Image (cartoon, rainbow, N blue to C red):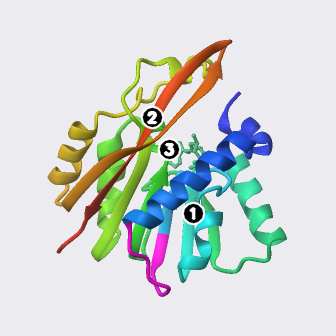
Amino acid sequence: MGFNEDAAIWDSDLRLKRGKAISEEIKSYIKVKGDYKALEFGCGTGIISFNLYDSFHHIDLIDTSEGMIEVLNSKIKQRNINNMRGICGEINKDIILEDKYDVIYTSMALHHVEDIYEVLKSLTKVLRKNGVLCIVDLDEEDGKFHKDHHGFNGHNGFNQEKLKNILCELGLKDIESRTFYYDEKVVEGEKVNYALFSMIGKKIL
Ligand SMILES: C[S@@+](CC[C@H](N)C(=O)[O-])C[C@H]1O[C@@H](n2cnc3c(N)ncnc32)[C@H](O)[C@@H]1O
C-alpha cells in the first residue's frame, strides 16, 4: 500500500503515541513563541502538528500524498482549527514556498526522500534569520523497518554525523542531535527494534 491508501488508517494508537513523544521532543528542543510561523514537511495526517498548533501563530503543512492531505484537511475542519493549512505537492515543483518560517520541522518523512540535500536546501532557504530546522527521523538501521513497504527506495534511517555534515554544508549553525525514542514494531511477523533521533540547526544569517 502507498501513503494515499494508508491515509485513512494512518492514525493508529502506535503512531499517535509515538507522535506525542515526537511533539514533546520538538517542543523541548525549540523555544517556541506564540507569534512564530512554522512549516511541517511531510506532515501526513498532521499527527505531530495537532499536538503543536496552539504553540504557534500559524502552521503550513506540506505533503506529496493527496490522501494524507485530504485526511489532514478534514481533521482541521472537524476540529475547527484556523491556524493550520494543508498543502499538497512536491516542494520546488508544485509548491513554491514564498513565506519565511521561524521553525521548520519534519518527522519520519525525510527517509522517504531520495535527494535529501535538495529538499533540505529548499527548507533552509525559507527559514527566517535565527529560524530553526528540526528533523526527527529514524536512526540508521538494517532495512528491516521498511521490509513490508514494497518499492521503498528511501533511506534505511540516517547516520547522525553524516546528516549533521549536510546541515553544516547548508550553512546551519549550533547543530545538535540526540537519540530520544526507542520502540519496536512487528514487520512480517518479526519484531523490529528501532530508534528515533532529533536534530536541530539554526540559520544565523
Ligand atoms: C512515514 S510518513 C510520516 C507522516 C507524519 N510526519 C507522521 O509522523 O505521522 C511520511 C510522509 O512523508 C510524505 N512524503 C514523502 N516524500 C515526500 C516529499 N518529497 N515531499 C513531501 N512529503 C513527502 C509521505 O507522503 C508521508 O505522508
Q: Position of residue 88 (x, y in %)?
A: 61, 56
Q: Position of residue 8 (x, y in %)?
A: 80, 44
Label 1 amino acid? Leu
Identify the element where label 1 is drawn. strand
Q: Which residues are magenta?
A: 30-38
Q: Position of residue 64 (x, y in %)?
A: 58, 48
Q: Is residue 42 left or right of residue 16?
A: left
Residue carrying label 2:
195
Residue, x 51% and y 18% (percent of image)? Answer: 144
The residue nearer to you, when weighing 15 against 118, is 15
Instruction: Determine the main secondary structure of the stretch shown in magenta.
Output: loop
Q: CA distance from mark 1 to mark 2?
A: 25 Å
Q: Is residue 46 left or right of residue 113?
A: right
Identify the element where label 3 is drawn. loop
Is residue 155 visible to us here?
Answer: yes
Residue carrying label 1:
61
Label 3 packing within 10 angstroms: few (<14), some (14-19), many (20+): some
Toward the top, the furthest residue is 189
Q: Look at the numbered disc 3 and say if its residue's Cβ is closer than 8 Å to ligand 1.
A: yes
Comes first in the chain, label 3 or label 1: 1
Q: CA distance from mark 3 to mark 1?
A: 12 Å
Toward the right, the furthest residue is 78
Q: Quadrant of the C terminus?
A: bottom left
Label 1 packing within 10 angstroms: few (<14), some (14-19), many (20+): many
Residue carrying label 3:
109
Q: Is 32 included in the stretch rendered in magenta? A: yes
What numbered label is drawn on residue 4? none
Q: Position of residue 199 (x, y in %)?
A: 33, 52
Where in the image, quadrant-wise, is ligand 1 located? top right
Label 3 amino acid? Ala
